Amino acid sequence: MQLFVVFEHASGYGLFRVREFEEVGAFLPQVEEAVTQAAKFQQVVKLVGFRAFTSAAQALENINAVSEGLLTEELKVFLETNLPKTKSKVQLGVCDSKLGAAVNEALGVGVTHVGVVPEIIRGIRTHLSHFVKGLNLASMKQTELGLGHSYSRGKVKFNINRADNMIIQSIALVDQLDKDINTFAMRIKEWYSYHFPELAKVVTDNYQYSKCAHFIKDRKTLSEESLPKLEEITMDSAVAQAILDASRMSMGMDISPIDLMNIERFAKRVSSLSDYRKQLAQYLKKKMDFVAPNLAVLIGEVVGARLISHAGSLTNLAKYPASTVQILGAEKALFRAIKTRSNTPKYGLIYHSTFIGRAALANKGRISRYLANKCSMASRIDCFSESLSSVFGEHLREQVEDRLAFYETGNIPRKNAEVMKEALEEHNAKMKEEKKTKKRKLDESINGGEEVAEVPKKKKKKGAEKVTVVAEIEVNEDPTQNLEDSIKKKKKKKKLQQQADSENLNVEKMEMEVASEVTAESPKKKKKKKKNIEEQQEGDAVDVINGVGEEIIALEETPKVKKKKKHAEGAIQEEIIPKAEVSKKKKKRQSL
């Protein structure tokens, strides 16, 4: 029995033959001693063949298949070419039992993965550079590192097109900025109130307060000329006038220019942070419209982003049931209620939705459960659909509105199947329109920004009217057709034209033959033909007349007339016969 071992590496497949292999138990100590030294291990194991991968993509595909226990075409061909033909005396060592089963089914070779095989594979892994020429340790490490990174990326299954990680980071930054802006605004109020304490009562908004502190600086410098700027900041003329009046009657202390300079810088930083927070909110809205448009339309961009962030990803949120989505963010209250055996929470992060705030106190639990159900549906549509649009989210939002109206008025809402069917039809129509607009834009970009002109109608023959009308309709409906369609249409037109030309040629041939026959006849032949035709016509006329006369006579003769005719014919015969006999006697006498 011969033992062969197949080894999978990032650079390719290797097949090794084990020398002096008899029994596993007796041979295992020798292998363990030889693994530590390359020279001894080369005496035990010999390289039979090595097949290198041509590209990194091929290596990743083969390693993925081997890890799942599948036999690739490359490995199958490699084993068939390098293993001996007498497979009954061959045993193949593999690293995985699943791969061994696949090899056994495909090639019919005895397979093992226990005993001495793991030690041999360990030795091959450590001394592979001594067996394969041109393969050094540096190149081996580089290929192993690259394949490991690509393999781990594939297992993580990170979706690049729908980067929900950006939503998670941006909503976390928005929450952090809200906290920081509030704390910084409180610090400005405490700091600037030493000089102008009345401003905090007149201007309550933190962003406007930091803007006003940055503009006013020293309250003594305020005058009637500064009112337009204050009106621009506060967006109210009455508030601007109140600030001016308060500055004239303020009880604040005087402040040094250096302190005012520091307050001014700090107020500028706080106002810039507030501006950045607004920009970040716009960025978050765009990202939600791109990644999860249905969830954003249903429950809002901020609440939807918080749900995705709390779940970890959009895929995780789509996998959650509606009952879990309902209490996301209220885990502490849930576990406390389970521990104390009290009532469990009705809602978590979805409490910030406007639907729960609009519902009555008795209906908050029911509407939160219904809203969580619709959120789970919207997240699944956003996660697993290929073409995204906000149509489904709009219809789901209408369903929640109808359910709120049902709790208040008792009007029965429509069924979910009807609503989803209508939403699917609208979605398909919208996708078709988007495809048409994309094609039109592509044509405009190809033509240098000019719109595609309509094809003018050409006058053609009557026989080809139907074909031309169909072609013009198709061009008007879809001005950007593929080259294959245009080639097919041209072929059809050519066939129709060829058929029409062939028919015209046949007609012309017939006319030419008749004309040639007419011109070839001489005047004598023409006269003979005329006579023959006249004789035939006269004979036909006589026959017709005789036939008509006989018919008339047959109709006019009655049975009495027929009897008289017969009697007369008999009398005539009697008179004719004796006369004939007399003439015969006279002839005899004369002869005698």
Image (cartoon, helix red, strand yellow):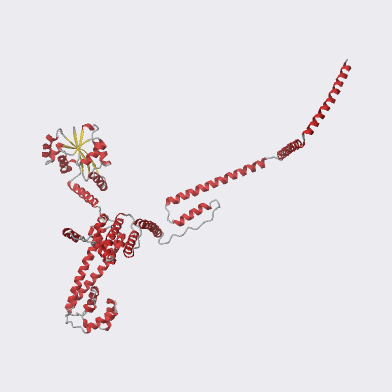
Residue 466, x across and y down, in percent: 52, 52
Quarter of the rendering containing residue 33: top left
Q: Out of 323 and 522, give the one closest to the viewer.
A: 323
Q: Out of 536 and 251, give the one closest to the viewer.
A: 251
Figure check: 83 above or below 340:
above
Question: Visible in this render: residue 313?
Answer: no
Question: Visible in this render: residue 248?
Answer: yes
Q: Quadrant of the C terminus?
A: top right
Quarter of the rendering containing residue 563: top right
Question: What residue occupies the far top of the structure in this picture?
Answer: 592
Does residue 540 appear left or right of residue 161 in this picture? right
Question: What residue occupies the far bottom of the structure in this picture?
Answer: 249
Q: How many numbered marks appear?
A: 0
Residue 492, x across and y down, in percent: 48, 48
Q: Out of 582 and 72, give the one closest to the viewer.
A: 582
Residue 474, x across and y down, in percent: 46, 54
Residue 309, x across and y down, in percent: 23, 60
Q: Out of 563 and 306, give the one closest to the viewer.
A: 563
Does residue 441 appear left or right of residue 503 in this picture? left
Q: Quadrant of the N terminus?
A: top left
Figure check: 578 above or below 163:
above
